[in-house]
Image (tube, grey):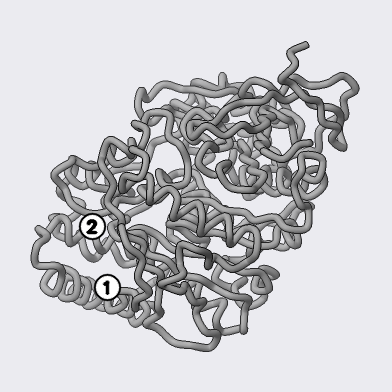
Amino acid sequence: MKTDTIIVETSYGPVRGIKRTSAVGDQFFSFRGIPYAKPPIGELRFKDPQLPDSWTHPIDATEAGHAAPALNMFTKGVVGNENCLILNVYTREYGDGSEMIYGPDYLLSKDIVYVSMNYRLGVLGFLSIEDPSAQVPGNAGIKDQSMALQWVRKNIHAFGGNSKNITVFGESAGAGSVHLHMLSDLSKGLFDKAIVQSGSALASWCNNPNKNWAERVAKKLGWDGVGGATELVNFLRKVDVEKLILAQEFRTDEEKRDWVFSEWGPCVEPYVSEQCLLDRSPSDMLKTAWSNGIPLIIGGTTEEGLLMYRDVTADPELYKGEKAYENLIPKEWNLSEEKTKTLAENLKSVYIEGGCPTKNEMQKFLDIISDKLFWHGMHSAVLGRLQVNAAPTYLYRFAFSADAKSNHIRQFLVPSEVKGVCHGEDIASIFKFSMNKEPTINGAEHRAIDRMTSLFTRFATTGNPNCDITKHCEWKSIPNRSSPPFKCLNIDDELSFIFYPESRRIALWDSMRP
């Protein structure tokens, strides 16, 4: 046995980890690929997660476990394995969850124990069938996360962590997941603080409309439509996982232009089951959410909408089409055609005619996308908390524009000549990306990493993000019962505590909502 390995006893059995050295030179213990649920294979495909069986001999947790099956964003090939319900624990203390993209190196320069988890994605994680006989109500991927949180609460003390001081954080889809856990009683009491980055459960993409996705993917794969829901599920369970993943994207151009963001995502479940996550819409759960009693950091980047730059470039009809602006008005508002046209004109007036003069029309259109897909949902989440005298809520706005070579998301999504801080750019200041160049010591990117990790880990430790970084610029929580505009910590090469600059745009969305 290697002298740099160590065995830790969990409630399910022993795991063997290994000592590693981070990109910034810190040593830490790494335990990767620890199962927190039974493998969701065979009859368990699409079903809610089940607790794992115990084991006697140490599991080898020195190497990375399987990522969930998904399309690789760069190669477009299928990667991962269905036996993916594992988590990773990284600690200095002992004495996606996949690391394919995100590494814990920067965070582990601070005094924390860090846990990442893998969960089911796409059709495997979010297939929902209305007929109870199929036993596939949906949201399995979020329920996976909840089961992983149960594991953390029960076992993290064995790795030097504090089981009574757990912070959950996520970005983009992960932010929507965190907010769902904050709203749902399924995850009640499983964590003590939350950080929500660039997303919320109130975002349109976190509320999947029922468009017969299950039937559509099954028929795409050759199902004859006979036998009802039970036969549909049986058919899909027998499909090779690679074929299933390759078939899971099939939105029409019309649906894309209506801003139906994905075929697969969280939904209000059609019936209540033992592990029910959502029995009603997230907006109806805000005032009674159990998490109103825990502190929250929430925020995003200045130009979130740049996420869609290549999509809009590839299909100019998204912003130039006859009904481009009408399509931005949420269909679930059920407005008349006349009212929809009026609101579309309001959007054009505020964003296009009254938008930033240095931006072209497409960039101004993407500002609408920033608010439609990200900022207005986060704003609404904040409003919901403030109305019930919630625990402290801290708002931030990430405005730091890093060297493009320091952020592969930026390189992949947006040409270098386009200005603005894209969706996902704040993550490069928290996690080490395997494809990014190392930041220069004491350079701007290095300072950004120290700034973000200091703020977030101080919050995770104490519930208050203020530390040496903010000694000249206190980050104050938003007063309960207050009204917008709200103040936020503007995170650039310097910190400033300012009124959120895009408040006028957000106010428009508030005024439009029925």
Q: Which residue type carries mark 1?
A: Thr
What residue is rendered at 52% in x and 49% in y?
Answer: 174
User: In which quarter of the view is residue 35 placed?
Assistant: top right
- For image coordinates 53% across by 88% down, the residue present is 481
Check the image and report above or below for 50 versus 334: above
Q: Quadrant of residue 26?
A: top right
Q: What residue type is labelled 2?
A: Leu
Mark 2 and mark 1: span between their CA atoms?
19 Å
Q: Give the residue at mark 1.
A: 340
Question: Which quadrant is home to the N terminus?
Answer: top right
Q: Which of marks 2 and 1 is in front?
A: 2
| Left or right: 462 in relation to 477 | right
Measured as percent of width and height from the top left, residue 230 is found at 68, 36
Quarter of the image where the C terminus is located: bottom left
Do we see residue 138 in this rendering?
no
Residue at the spot x=13%, y=44% of the render?
417
Q: Report the side of 6 relative to 493 (left or right).
A: right
Q: Label 2: few (<14), some or many (≥20) within 10 Å?
A: many
Q: In the rendering, at what x and y percent does residue 409 appear?
A: 34, 39
200 relative to 74 in the view: left or right:
right
Farthest residue toward the right?
Answer: 56
Q: In the rendering, at what x and y percent does residue 310 appear?
A: 22, 42
Question: How many labels sit on residues?
Answer: 2
The residue to which callout 2 is attached is 366
Task: Please state which of residues 505 and 481 is positioned toward the viewer in this rendering.
Answer: 481
Q: Which residue is drawn at 72% across and 30% down?
A: 34
429 or 288, which lies in front?
Answer: 429
